[in-house]
Image (spheres, rainbow, N blue to C red):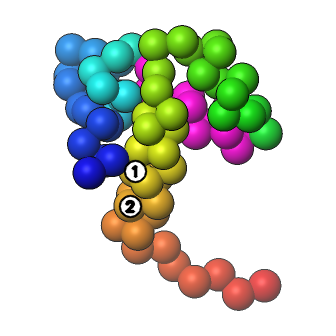
Amino acid sequence: MLIDRITHNPAVMGGKPCIRGLRVTAGTILGLMASGKSRERILQAYPYLEPEDLDAVLAYAAWRLEERDEPLVVT
């Protein structure tokens, strides 16, 4: 399962969700992807990451969003 690549350890990055216990947070990678950085560019910048790690970040973010109850805002 891809989400298994996302780890939580209080001793690493203050317990933020990280990729495979590395000091790279899921939020950092998700932010790069959201800002338009290509997968190839991210993997160049973080050569110890694997393509599956990027898929795991997206899967984790989607899972977390499903777990949250957000109030409906009508504009």
Q: Is residue 57 above or below residue 24?
A: below
Q: Which residue is the site of mark 1?
A: 60
Badge 1: residue crowd in 10 Å (few <14, some 14–19, many ≥20)? many
Badge 2: residue crowd in 10 Å (few <14, some 14–19, many ≥20)? few
- Cα distance between the residues tagged 1 and 2: 5 Å
User: For this view, does 30 lie left or right of residue 48?
Assistant: right
Q: Which residue is the site of mark 2?
A: 63
- Magenta segment boundaries in residue numbering: 24-35
Asked if one can make out residue 57 in the rendered structure from this viewpoint, the answer is: no
Q: Secondary structure at mark 1?
A: helix
Q: Is residue 10 above or below residue 75?
A: above
Residue 71 in the image: state x and y as whole percent.
Answer: 51, 78
User: For this view, does 37 lie left or right of residue 42?
Assistant: right
Asked if one can make out residue 34 in the rendered structure from this viewpoint, the answer is: yes
Quadrant position of residue 30: top right
Residue 11 in the image: state x and y as whole percent.
Answer: 21, 14
Discs 1, 2 touching: Cβ within 8 Å: yes
